[in-house]
Structure formats: C-alpha cells, structure tokens
Image (cartoon, helix red, strand yellow):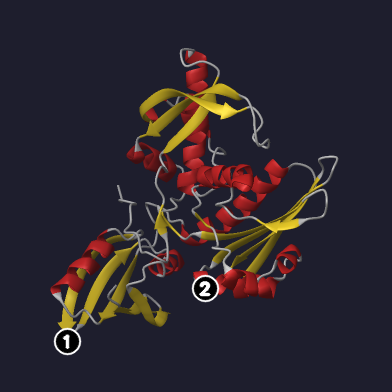
Amino acid sequence: MLCLTCCTPAGFAVEVEGLYQATITVESRNNEAERRRAFSEAMREVLTKVSGLSETINSSSVRRALNNPEPYVESWRAQANLVPVNAEAQVSELREVIAIEVNFYESEIQRLLDENNMPIWPANRPETLIWMVVQDELSERQIINNNSPENAARITALQKVADARGLPLLFPLLDLEDQLRLNVNSLWDLDEAAILNASQRYQAESILALRIYRSLSGEVLAKSLYFFRDNVFSYEEFELSEDFISGSINLASDELSQYFSVLISGTDNNVIINMQIDDIDSPEDYAALLTYLNTLEGVYSFQLTRVTGSSLYLEMLTGGQLRQLVETIALQPNLLEVSELNRVGDDVAMHYRWVQN
C-alpha cells in the first residue's frame, strides 16, 4: 500500500491532520443504534475527506461498507461538551452535547477506495485564502477578522465545513497593507483585480472570496468567487447561510482535489520518468531529496542512474498520472522547475533544481 503522508513544505502547503477521523453528535453514548449511525456518518465524512470527492457512495461495495462500518473502525470514544443554545447570541445558555470521535484504519480506507477506483487526495494540501465580507440589516459592511469575538460563530461555521472536507484555510492579517490593497467596498463588489492584488502577499493560488447579506427578515443573499490558477468560479445562495458556506467550500475542495488526487494503483499504463535535479551540493541535500521522493504520491520506485557534478539523474516508475505528479511536486518549495515536463512517445523527462530552505 502506497504511503500517502508527505513532508510539509512551509508556505506552499500544509499537512492536514485528522483525515481518518470524524466526530459525530449522538443522542446517547450507550445506545448501540446511535453508535452504529455515528460510525456510518463518520466513515462517510472520512471517505469524502480522503478521496476529495463530494459523492463517494455510488459504488455498491462502498454502500455495503457504510452499512457495516465496524471493521474499518480502529478506535472510538464518547465525550460530553457544553455548547451555546444560540451560537449567534453574545450571551446564551449552554446545553450538553454528546459526541462520538471515531478513528478509522488508514490502510482499510485506502484499500476500499482503491478497490473502487477512487482517488486519494494526499494529506499535503494547499491552503485556501479566505476573504469574507458581511453586510448587516443596517447596511453596515465589515470584512471578517477571524480573531474578533463577534465573528466567532461565522468563522467556526466556515472552519467546521472546511474540516469536514479536509480543506486547510488561511485567513488574511487584515492589517494596513491589506486594507490599502482591498477595501471593504471592493470586496463587497467582488472586484476580481483587487482581490487578486491583495492576495499576492500570501502567495496563495487557491483564493475564496465570500459576500454575505442578511436582511431583517433573516433572508440570506450571498455570493462567492473562487480563484485557482487562471480560473474563476462562482456560487450563489438565496436562502440558508449554512448551504452557502457548504457550497462555497465544496467549490474550492472539488477543484483542488481534481488537480492533486491520485489513484493508488495508478493507471494501466505505468510510465518511466527520467528526472534531472540540479544543485544537490551536500549530503544533507541528498538525504532530504531521498526522503521527499520516498513519500511522493504516484511514484512506485526510483533509482539513481548517474551523477554529474551537482546534478543527479533518476529513473522513476510512476502510475502514469503525470499532471497530478507535476502539481504535487509544485507544492514542494525545495524543488523549482527548470523546464516543463517533456514527453515524446514513451520518453518522459522532468528537470528541477534543488533550493535549500
């Protein structure tokens, strides 16, 4: 089974924890039927996080697994928490909520996905930069700061949905530089040029801008724009803020997983890649490179073919998913592309240079 845990390149991507874990609210910790339901819901969430797919239950064998989740459960525990009755209120009564935290066997979840030809979205994932602006009933507009207590409920709701999809979020500082680049009215207008300009300092390729208006009657009018590479996607909601948050997060997650998910078993046509890596100037560089290659998704094996000066030449056996491999390597800050992947018939070449941290 291919190991899918990567190194964490700071500034390019983060390693998402808890992909094989989910917490589900139940009515009773001692009710067997409730516990079984929690196991099934938790497994559904884990399959979504790990695969990157919004819908994973089309397969009959996946449905059978969800109906009998116990063999996939490594451990679980019940815990009681006190939560506000009204999350929107500044002062609210507390109520007890019982939740079951379920941990699943990583190898079994991967095997289930592999058997059903479903991909794995590796734990090393790019952060999505969040810009959020809210207009209240009095037409006052405010860019949401994730550190302010009055916005805690909105940030918590956003983070909860993102966690359920395994999508790491990055919030802007909202300091003077941010305010000069992107004022509240430009964000409300979803000014694409201003949003992209303000996002440059964070070096984020994945950017989600959300605009929310709630009327006195409680009606929600909301729109989001999602930027990734040279593409822009939009999502709108006119009723429930919960649906808007979920739809916006799914928009980002679905697009990212298409780029970075890989099949464990690869394709029917495995490909050998000749890779050149320049500027390996020390034993430490060489050791770090080998450590990274050993955890690179879609690479089954590799061997050193020759060394010329500070350049290494490697032969790598891959699953043939070349675009995903290129996208995954792009998350590694130590490897900079010298020239684009070149393929002529069965001959595939990649050329990178090593950059020390």
Picture quarter with the C terminus: bottom left
Judging depth in this view, the residue of 150 and 282 nearest the camera is 150
Amino acid type assigned to the residue bearing label 1 in the image: Gly
| Side of 287 where 240 appears, left or right | right
Question: Which residue is disc 1 drawn over?
Answer: 309
Q: Please tell me whether residue 129 is drawn above or below residue 21 in the rendered image.
A: below
Judging depth in this view, the residue of 269 and 141 nearest the camera is 141
Amino acid type assigned to the residue bearing label 2 in the image: Arg
Question: Which residue is disc 2 drawn over?
Answer: 201
| Side of 177 where 316 appears, left or right | left
Judging depth in this view, the residue of 111 and 130 nearest the camera is 130
Q: Residue at x 23, y 78 (%)?
A: 313
Relative image position of residue 23 (x, y in whole percent): 48, 32
Relative image position of residue 8 (x, y in whole percent): 34, 59
How many other residues sit within 10 Å of disc 2, few (<14), some (14-19) or many (≥20)? few
Q: Please tell me whether residue 23 is drawn above or below residue 1 in the rendered image.
A: above
